[in-house]
Image (cartoon, helix red, strand yellow):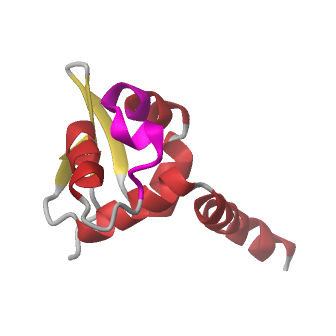
Amino acid sequence: EMAEVVKMLPGVVAATVAEYDPIIEALVMFTSEWKKPTAFIGDIVEWVQADMDRRYSAIKTLSNSILLGRYMKSHAYDIEQATGCTITRRNNTTFLRLPTSD
C-alpha cells in the first residue's frame, strides 16, 4: 500500500506544480496545440505572441526566448512530467520533443 502511494507521488507533485505555475500551464497548452514532433524555444515565444486570446502574453518569461530557455533548464523535470515532452539540448539550442501519439 505504501509502495503504491510512493509510486503515485511524482504524478501528484507534477499535477500540482502545473496547476499553480502559469508557465507550465502555458507549456501544457502549447503541447496540446502544436502539431509538429519538435518545438524550439522560438516556436513557443511566437505561439504566445500570435495567440489571439492573449492567454499568456502578460508572462514576461514566455515572451523572451532567453528567459524561457533559462526557465526550461531550471524546471526541466516539472515540464517533462506535466507535458510529457523531453527537453533536449543540441548545438547550444534547446528544444522540446513532443510525445508521439502512437
Q: Can you say whether 78 is above or below 63 in the image?
A: below
Residue sitting at x 40%, y 35% = 68
Residue sitting at x 13%, y 60% = 36
Name the image quarter holding residue 13: bottom right
Q: Position of residue 19 (x, y in %)?
A: 62, 66
Along the viewing direction, whichever of 96 and 41 lies nearer the viewer: 41
Tally of numbered discs: 0
Side of 55 where 11 appears, left or right: right
Q: Quadrant of the C terminus?
A: bottom left
Along the viewing direction, whichever of 86 and 41 lies nearer the viewer: 41
Name the outermost residue toward the top. 92
Residue 78 located within the stretch drawn in magenta? no
Principal secondary structure, stretch drawn in magenta: helix
Name the outermost residue toward the bottom. 1
Q: Position of residue 59 (x, y in %)?
A: 47, 45
Q: Position of residue 99 (x, y in %)?
A: 29, 63
Side of 99 where 82 appears, left or right: right
Side of 46 where 14 appears, left or right: right
Q: Can you say whether 71 is above or below 52 in the image?
A: above
Q: Position of residue 75 (x, y in %)?
A: 54, 40
Look at the image and give the residue range highlighted in magenta.
56-68
Residue 59 located within the stretch drawn in magenta? yes
Residue sitting at x 73%, y 65% = 9
Residue sitting at x 79%, y 73% = 5
Name the image quarter holding residue 101: bottom left
Q: Quadrant of the N terminus?
A: bottom right
Q: Can you say whether 49 is above or below 63 in the image?
A: below
Name the outermost residue toward the left. 36
Q: Can you say whether 4 is above or below 86 in the image?
A: below
